[in-house]
Image: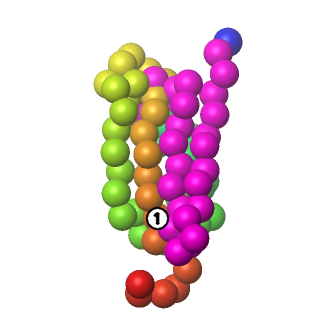
Amino acid sequence: MHKQEIEITISPSGEVSFQVKGVKGASCVAETQFLEQALGGAVLEREHTPEYYQQPEDNYVTNYAGGDDDD
């Protein structure tokens, strides 16, 4: 079994981004669904890494709007 990680970054402005590591294929979307729900913000951008296009298990980066501000 290989190591799976979710790296979470919060910018000073409150924008949250995260990257899934050690998961190939589109299953990363399911792996991070709980974060999307917990953050409750709109997905601003989703960027797929090369691992996304490999046979199942994956990586990608998703950015969320932080807080209720319209900044």
Observer-nearest residue: 57 or 14? 14
The quadrant in which residue 45 appears is: bottom left
Q: Residue furthest front?
A: 12
Q: Can you give x and y, in whole percent of width and height, for residue 4 in the image?
A: 63, 28
Mark 1 surroundings within 10 Å by alpha-carbon count, few (fewer than 14), some (14 through 19), many (20 or more): many
Q: Can you give x and y, in whole percent of width and height, for residue 35 in the image?
A: 59, 55
Q: Residue furthest top?
A: 1
Q: Can you give x and y, in whole percent of width and height, for residue 56 in the image?
A: 44, 21
Residue at the disc numbered 1: 64
Can you say which quadrant of the picture contains the N terminus? top right
What residue appears at the point 46 percent right and 64 percent down from the top-left corner?
64
Q: Can you give x and y, in whole percent of width and height, for residue 68 in the image?
A: 52, 85
What residue appears at the point 53 percent right and 37 percent down from the top-left corner?
20
Judge whether 12 appears above or below 26 on screen: below
Observer-nearest residue: 30 or 43? 43
The tally of labels here is 1
Highlighted range, magenta: 2-27
Q: Quick one: SS at disc 1?
A: strand
What residue appears at the point 52 percent right and 26 percent down from the top-left corner?
23
Q: Is residue 4 magenta?
A: yes
Q: Amino acid at mark 1?
A: Tyr
Observer-nearest residue: 44 or 55? 44
Can you say which quadrant of the picture contains the C terminus? bottom left
Q: Is residue 28 magenta?
A: no
Image position of 71 (left or right of 31): left
The quadrant in which residue 55 appears is: top left
Q: Does the rendering let one see residue 33?
A: no
Judge whether 35 appears above or below 28 on screen: below
Q: Does the rendering let one see residue 45?
A: yes
For the rendered model, the colour scheme is rainbow
Image position of 3 (left or right of 60): right
